[in-house]
Every structure is written in structure tokens, then in C-alpha cells.
Image: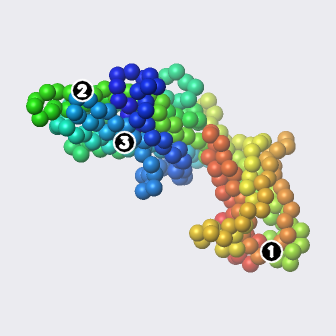
Amino acid sequence: MSLHGTSRSSALRRGLVALATAATLLAGGLVVAPSAQATPLVDTSEREGTVVTTRMQAKGSVITGDVETDKLYPARVTYWVNLDWTGGELQSFDGVVTLQRAGARQVRTFPLTLNAAGDRHRVIELPGTITAGSYRVGIEFTATVERRDGRLVEHTVDLNNAKTVPVQRWSMIKASVSNPTATDGRSSRIKGEVFVLGVGADGDLTWDRMQSGTVRLSYDPDGPWEDRAREVFVRNLTVSGAHGTFFTRVAARDRWWKLTYTGTSQFAPAVKWLPQGDHSGCGC
């Protein structure tokens, strides 16, 4: 993600292409490489017959931990950078990756080096009780390209606050269905709660009950092992009340009920499967 020019004015940001902001969220705070369909943010700097093209992608992760042992696994921000140049040979590169939480004034910088092909992939760990929210990832660098006539052309790129990724806290759903083996259409009640990982000032980890939010109810006869092509939406449920519960009534059928907490910018989505009928050994 780069911008050509020497200032941060909006006039110099016309080279940007929008980058999808979906985060890959894995237990343990791990982040995987972007899929082949992911669209990198691209910028092109053109000066005196030379062109420097920058591509960048970034991903956030989930803050997870072991509540029983108070072991916190750090959140991570992963970035991928690719630099291409034409019109000469790249002679020097000096740059940093910037990271800033939305609403905060502090900007953290991390040295950026490229291999011979102009690539770099790195995971930035955010240890401790890092604050969940949106984090802006940017690049600042100077690249010098030597033209065939020996002239040196300097490209200064300052792309700050260009890509925003979520860093979220782990969440989970606890739920049950009454009459779990019934399939005769009788009334069954689905009831549950949503919890989010809490990190105390002293480092203690807890599961805190949420008192608001939305849980999507759907079902799939094939359960969590299929490709979800048969998933059928039923209704949205509201998390509310002093104890932060949600509930609804359904007709008992031989199917898998799926509860999906939709999440927020700070709290990660969560899924819970509830089998109804003969689904022994469900592992859900």
C-alpha cells in the first residue's frame, strides 16, 4: 500500500485501490496468508521515466487465551508487501511499516526490508493486554532507481492510515436445545449466552457475559462437516436482559441448529452447533 509523492495530501492518494477488510480469525491468534481472491491495495509512483509499484495486504487476528492458567496469546497483525520497479535498477530502499490503533495518537513503526524480488512477509506480535479495535497499517519508504543513463531517481512514499484491520477479542456461545432427541415437531426452546474473553489490568483472564448483540439462527441437516450449501436462515435473536441471554422456540426436527454471533469491531464472531434428533457423537 503506497502513495507516490512527498506529502500526505489527498491529491497524492489517487493511486489507491480499495482493499477488502475481512479478517481471518483462528483460535490461538494464528493468521493465515490471504486467499488467491484477496485484492491487494496498489499504488504507483511515476517519476522521470521510472515507475515504482507497491502492493500490500494486511490481516488482523483474535486475542485468545487460556482462562484457567491466565495465559494470554498475543494478537497479531500480518502484512505482505511486494515492490516492482521499471525504467532502471533499484539501488536503495529505506522504509518502515506503521501501525496505529484508530483513535490513538501513538504510531508504532517496524523496520521494513525487502528481498531481491522486492517481497516481504512478516507477523507483528502485539503482546500483553492489547486493546481490541481497528488498527491502521501503512508504509513509509524511500526507493532510489538508477536509470540506464546513470541518473538516480528517488521515489518517496508515505501511505499512512491506508489499510484498517480488526484486532478482536475471542468470543464463544454457550447454548442448549430442549427435547434434543425429538423430531416430531413439538415445541423446543433454544436458549444461550454469549461470552467474550476479558483481560484484567492484573492479567487475569475471564469469560465475561455479553449483554447485547445479535445471534443468527439457521439450520443445516448435514451439520458442521458439509459445505454449508444447505444452510437455511431462520431468524435473528437478540442478546439482552440482565443476564445477557437469548432464546427462541422452534419445532423439533431432525437437523442441526446453527447459532452464529455476528461479532463487532472488537469482539470476534462465534459459532455453536446444536444437534436435534439422532446425532450421537456430534463433537460440537
As drawn, the residue found furthest toward the left would be 149
Which residue is disc 1 drawn over?
253
Above/below status of 77 relative to 228? above
The quarter of the displayed image where residue 37 is located:
bottom left
In front of the other: 161 or 145: 145
| Rendering coords of residue 41 (x, y %) | 43, 41
Q: CA distance from mark 3 to mark 1?
A: 50 Å
In front of the other: 200 or 121: 121
Which of the two discs, 3 and 1, labels the residue nearer the N terminus? 3
Q: Please tell me which residue is depicted at 42% across the width and 52% down the height of the picture.
A: 33
Scheme of image coloration: rainbow
Q: How many marks?
A: 3
Which residue is disc 3 drawn over?
55
**Badge 1: residue crowd in 10 Å (few <14, some 14–19, many ≥20):** many
Above/below status of 76 relative to 7? below
**Badge 3: residue crowd in 10 Å (few <14, some 14–19, many ≥20):** many
Which of the two discs, 2 and 1, labels the residue nearer the N terminus? 2
